[in-house]
Amino acid sequence: MSEEFNEADINLDEIDFSDLEEKYSVKQPTNLLSKYVIVDGAPIAPESKAPMLKKVLTKLFSQCGEVADMFLPTEDEKTKGYLIVEFKNAQSVDLAVKQLNGKKLDVKHRLLVNKLSDVEKYVLNNNNSSDEFVEPEIPPFQSHGYLKSWLQDPAGRDQFMLHHNDVVGVYWNKKQSDPEPISKELEDLFILVLD
């Protein structure tokens, strides 16, 4: 008489899979990441201009060695502001980090170039890293007073600056009478600056 097979009766913790794991394990090449750099600070451009941007960046990174591939991700029809560059050899990666890290691409964009293999090292060295979000502690509000109090006048008068020919001055505005200089020293300072 044969017993029926019941899957619930098998304890998977008792089965040794080590021979199968060894036989079918995929060995990761140790130098896989050594040919890549990750670049932050690239311009965020419309997707239609992405090929031109890729061409310019490829030309820039080709100064350090032969570029095998460049990944310029896009989202919502715009580039995301970073890219991943693959070089043909690891020496080009070192040269790219040395020569192009901190390089100004234009007035608004400065490239930050790091080895892709270093990213994990930076994360592991940060003891505060965690997969869980921890809300930052917000310090209690401390009032510093009114920051523009130096502009206030106890009499509620406004200030204005007058510059006419050689006459320069800062005055209190008085409705019915002539303006009153705020201070003679300030008036002399303006005369020196404008001369």
Image: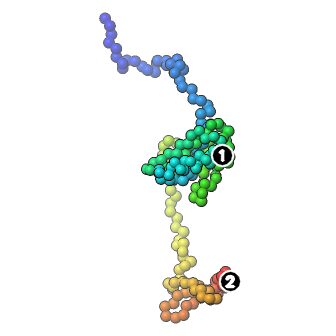
Q: Pointers 2 and 1 in contact (CB under 8 A)?
A: no
Q: Residue 73 location in percent, x, y?
A: 50, 45
Q: Which residue is mark 1?
A: 63
Quadrant that contains the C terminus? bottom right
Using the rendered image of the protein, determine whether residue 135 is visible from the camera's viewpoint: no
The label shown at residue 195 is 2
Q: Residues within 10 Å of mark 1 (few under 14, many from 20)?
A: some
Colouring mode (rainbow / by chain / secondary structure / one colour): rainbow
Using the rendered image of the protein, determine whether residue 11 is visible from the camera's viewpoint: yes
Residue type, numbered disc 2 = Asp
SS for dot 2: loop
Residue type, numbered disc 1 = Gln
Judging depth in this view, the residue of 162 and 60 nearest the camera is 60
44 lies left or right of 100: left
Q: Residue 129 location in percent, x, y?
A: 55, 43
Quadrant that contains the N terminus? top left
Q: Residue furthest top?
A: 1
Q: Residue furthest left?
A: 1
* Residue at position x 57%, y 26% in the image: 27
155 lies left or right of 96: left
